């Protein structure tokens, strides 16, 4: 019922939001006579603030159209590699006709960025993707808003998340693949790779885990405390609601995005209040750059999605309440998750010194579980002065974190075969194939020739033999 009431409230607020948007433009546009009346700038600022507080925030675009590689601008095209009911695997394909100025981009390692399904869209990792593109072929999981998935598609659980990750890894191929998981997906990614290792499947060359809740018993944060303060039944009864009839997922049980957004804001309300007041002041002062930065941040921060109820409740129970992964008690589809079985996959963990979502030690706990990975292939980084978002987005990510991620991937990447060697191998393979084809082609001819020779011999021998046999038979009769 709460979801329906929220939709009624949004519908009632919509006309005032449109009016505020129109008012902001009328009192600020250069070609509007209202922009010249006394107090126009203050009125426009007030209208825009009202508009941004009341508007709906749709999923933003990645908007990555080019990337600089070796000081050359390379076009980028966003493609859908795999489409599932609850997720799309996106590929950011780089194109270039400057082979003489660039290295061969086909030799770059592939990186699968597993984005969190925890409220925000995968576009929150735009900076992560754009930075990685300079040196890698990049894929990312783009999770679908659960209210847009018809109920006929069935439920989506944490086990399904793991199965999706495994399918995406197999689709890309593990020859030179490196998996980067940010926040929440560190747990299902570790489970996915552990199960693949137990089955004897080829594994990615490395896993990079950033600010994730591998073991939430280490340095618990307010997020962890909230998840453990109430029993699982409380979450099911208070935050799970049915999708209203105006969405394709009508009837599906979800954790609504608007409730998640309220939780985000409630974690630090003073900061958001100050940010909006500063935005209003920037508009009054004409500081357009600061105002644009505010819009860019909140266009992303306020865009949230609904999570499937089954997946959300599974995560609360498995990760935050029962700690099944670090305790070695987690079963997925009837199989025990055992990270110690991982052998041929390097591990890098990254934490922010000031992370207030995944506390220090929670991600590093993966090293205690992955005992099968040699110590030389395991590394941990704590980023000084970085919060949760700083380890995968912004200046610290680009200048402090990424160089270490890039170096780690390069150290464990499959080395491409040199071009002359490739040509030699191709020539050898082609020659061998030609000889085999010639041999197969000549085999029937030889067989026919041999058959004809035998037949001829039979014919040449059979006439005298028949004459001799007839003579012998006649003498016996006499």
Image (cartoon, rainbow, N blue to C red):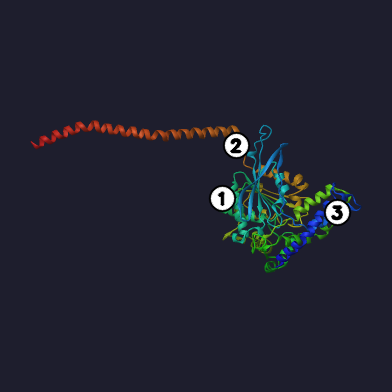
Q: Residue furthest left?
A: 478
Q: Earlier in the sequence, mark 1 or mark 2?
A: 1
Q: Earlier in the sequence, mark 2 or mark 3?
A: 3
Q: Residue 105 vs residue 28: left or right?
A: left
**Residue 43 in the image: x percent, y percent?**
87, 55
**Which residue is drawn at the image coordinates 70% and 46% (left, top)?**
129
Label 1, secondary structure: give it: loop
Position above or below: 88 against 422: below
- Asked if the residue under mark 1 is in contact with the one under mark 3, i.e. CB atoms within 8 Å, the reply is no
Per the image, the residue denoted by label 2 is 417
Q: Earlier in the sequence, mark 3 or mark 1?
A: 3
Mark 3: few, some, or many residues within 10 Å (few <14, many ≥20)? many
Indicate the quadrant where residue 476 lies: top left
Could you tell me which quadrant the C terminus lies in?
Answer: top left
- The residues tagged by marks 1 and 2 sit, at their Cα atoms, a distance apart of 23 Å
Q: Which residue is at the front of the view, 202 or 96? A: 96
| Disc number for residue 45 | 3
Label 2, secondary structure: give it: loop
Indicate the quadrant where residue 220 lies: bottom right
Mark 2: few, some, or many residues within 10 Å (few <14, many ≥20)? few
- The residues tagged by marks 3 and 1 sit, at their Cα atoms, a distance apart of 58 Å
Indicate the quadrant where residue 192 lies: bottom right
**Which residue is drawn at the image coordinates 53% and 32% (left, top)?**
427
**Residue 456 in the image: x percent, y percent?**
27, 31
Q: Residue furthest front?
A: 33
Q: Residue 49 vs residue 341: left or right?
A: right
The reply to whether residue 66 is visible in this rendering is yes
Per the image, the residue denoted by label 1 is 201
**Residue 260 in the image: x percent, y percent?**
73, 61
- The residues tagged by marks 2 and 3 sit, at their Cα atoms, a distance apart of 60 Å
């Amino acid at each position: 019922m709460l979801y329906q009431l929220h939709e009624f409230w949004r519908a009632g607020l919509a006309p005032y939001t449109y009016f505020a948007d129109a008012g902001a433009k009328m009192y600020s546009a250069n070609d509007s006579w209202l922009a010249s009346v006394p107090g126009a700038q203050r009125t426009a600022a007030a209208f825009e603030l009202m508009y941004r507080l009341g508007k709906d925030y749709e999923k933003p675009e990645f908007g990555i159209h080019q990337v600089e590689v070796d000081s050359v601008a390379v076009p980028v095209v966003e493609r859908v590699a795999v489409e599932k009911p609850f997720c799309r695997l996106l590929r950011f394909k780089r194109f270039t006709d400057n082979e003489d100025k660039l290295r061969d981009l086909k030799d770059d390692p592939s990186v699968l960025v597993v984005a969190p399904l925890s409220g925000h869209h995968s576009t929150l990792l735009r900076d992560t993707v754009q930075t990685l593109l300079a040196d890698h072929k990049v894929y990312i999981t783009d999770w679908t808003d659960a209210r847009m998935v018809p109920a006929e598609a069935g439920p989506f659980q944490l086990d399904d998340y793991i199965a999706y990750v495994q399918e995406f890894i197999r689709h890309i191929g593990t020859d030179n693949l490196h998996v980067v998981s940010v926040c929440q997906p560190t747990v299902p990614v570790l489970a996915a790779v552990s199960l693949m290792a137990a089955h004897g499947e080829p594994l990615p060359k490395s896993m990079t885990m950033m600010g994730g809740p591998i073991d939430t018993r280490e340095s618990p944060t307010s997020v962890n405390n909230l998840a453990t303060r109430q029993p699982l039944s409380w979450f099911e009864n208070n935050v799970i609601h049915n999708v209203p009839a105006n969405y394709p997922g009508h009837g599906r049980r979800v954790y609504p995005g608007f409730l998640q957004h309220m939780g985000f804001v409630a974690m630090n309300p003073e900061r958001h209040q100050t940010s909006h007041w500063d935005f209003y002041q920037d508009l009054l002062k004409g500081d357009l750059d600061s105002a644009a930065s505010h819009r860019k941040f909140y266009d992303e921060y306020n865009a949230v999605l609904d999570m499937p109820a089954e997946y959300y409740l599974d995560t609360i129970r498995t990760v935050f309440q029962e700690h099944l992964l670090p305790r070695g008690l987690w079963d997925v589809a009837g199989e025990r998750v055992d990270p110690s079985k991982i052998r041929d996959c390097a591990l890098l963990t990254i934490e922010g010194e000031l992370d207030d979502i995944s506390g220090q030690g929670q991600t590093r706990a993966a090293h205690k579980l992955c005992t099968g990975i040699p110590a030389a292939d395991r590394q941990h980084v704590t980023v000084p002065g970085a919060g949760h978002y700083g380890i995968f987005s912004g200046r610290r990510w680009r200048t402090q974190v990424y160089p270490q991620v890039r170096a780690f991937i390069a150290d464990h990447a499959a080395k491409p075969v040199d071009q002359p060697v490739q040509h030699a191998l191709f020539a050898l393979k082609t020659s061998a194939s030609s000889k085999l084809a010639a041999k197969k082609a000549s085999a029937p001819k030889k067989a026919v020739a041999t058959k004809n020779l035998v037949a001829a011999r039979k014919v040449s021998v059979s006439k005298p033999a028949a004459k001799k046999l007839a003579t012998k038979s006649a003498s016996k009769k006499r």
